[in-house]
Image (cartoon, grey):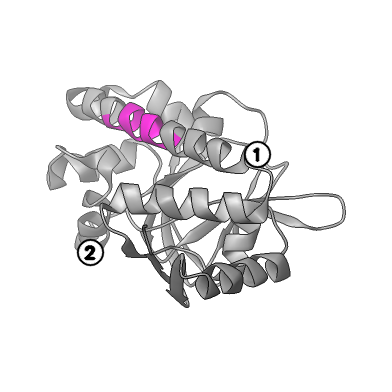
């Protein structure tokens, strides 16, 4: 990063890993971390399976999808990453040689990438605020671990209906309301739940007819008894 970019710094400042770090310090920190800005068109990959895992990403705008693909090309959506969130931190900071997932833009996106080795072994210029970055990063990784545990619990259910309802109840609990939006369209939700889209659509229709849920696109209402 050769010079200050006020808009970029303002976007980056929203990320939880930079909480408590002032704009001036953030500018110096990004330079120390070898920050690079990537603008991605919808469908363009930020990282591929098999690539070297040496950077983490901070989403400035847009959204990214973290996925795996089996030998037949069938996709499993692991997570959707939105603005101010981080991606690939666990693999990069764990010292993994290569990426085991694909990270692709769900829409036109702007991403900041940081060198993981600079995070683990900071230069002297970053010492005043580097500890805060590491603490923030550890907290963000803890949150992601909890999210992964919730997904494992959802996928432990065998049927499409049980997976769907477990997911919807988890979102309702997280948002504190039975009336909410989910971050997926129908295909993405099917990929996230590891079920066929046709089976998911049929289950949504059936549960709606029973009066247990109502939905419109990515908006759901839970009808509690």
- Judge the density around disc 1: few (<14), some (14-19), many (≥20) Cα neighbours within 10 Å: some
- Name the mark nearer the viewer: 1 or 2: 1
Above or below, 111 relative to 208: above
Secondary structure beneath disc 1? loop
Q: How far apart are marks 1 and 2 (CA)?
A: 30 Å
Magenta stretch contains residue 125: no
Residue 137 appears in the picture as rendered: yes
Q: Do the residues labelled 1 and 2 touch (CB within 8 Å)?
A: no
- Judge the density around disc 2: few (<14), some (14-19), many (≥20) Cα neighbours within 10 Å: few
Span highlighted in magenta in the image: 136-144
Tag shown at residue 7: 2
13 to the left or right of 149: left
Between 143 and 179, the one lying in front of the other is 179
Residue in the image at 52% along x and 70% along y: 210
Residue on which disc 1 sits? 99
Image quadrant in which the C terminus is located: bottom left
Q: Where is residue 1 in the image (x, y as percent from the top left)?
A: 35, 51
How many badges with numbers are in the image?
A: 2
Sequence order check, earlier mark of 1 and 2: 2
Tag shown at residue 77: none
Above or below, 11 relative to 21: below
Residue in the image at 48% along x and 38% along y: 150
48 to the left or right of 113: right
Chief SS of the magenta region: helix
Above or below, 124 relative to 18: above
Which residue in the rendered view is the most extreme toward the right? 72
Q: Where is residue 18 in the image (x, y as percent from the top left)?
A: 24, 41
Residue in the image at 53% along x and 41% along y: 151
């Amino acid at each position: 990063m050769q010079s200050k970019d006020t808009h970029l710094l303002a976007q980056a400042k929203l990320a939880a890993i930079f909480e408590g770090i002032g704009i001036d310090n953030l500018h110096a920190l990004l330079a120390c971390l070898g920050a690079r800005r990537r603008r991605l068109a919808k469908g363009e990959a930020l990282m591929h399976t098999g690539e070297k895992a040496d950077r983490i990403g901070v989403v400035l705008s847009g959204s990214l999808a973290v996925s795996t693909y089996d030998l037949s090309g069938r996709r499993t959506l692991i997570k959707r990453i939105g603005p101010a969130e981080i991606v690939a931190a666990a693999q990069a900071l764990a010292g993994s040689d290569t990426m085991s997932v694909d990270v692709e833009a769900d829409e036109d996106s702007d991403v900041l990438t940081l060198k993981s080795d600079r995070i683990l072994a900071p230069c002297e210029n970053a010492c005043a605020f580097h500890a805060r970055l590491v603490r923030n990063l550890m907290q963000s990784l803890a949150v992601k671990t909890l999210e992964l545990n919730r997904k494992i619990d959802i996928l432990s259910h065998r049927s499409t209906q049980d997976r769907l309802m477990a997911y919807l109840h988890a979102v309702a609990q997280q948002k504190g309301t039975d009336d909410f939006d989910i971050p997926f369209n129908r295909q993405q939700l099917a990929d996230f739940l590891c079920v066929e889209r046709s089976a998911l659509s049929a289950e949504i229709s059936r549960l709606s007819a029973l009066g247990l849920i109502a939905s419109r696109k990515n908006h759901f209402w839970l009808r509690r008894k």
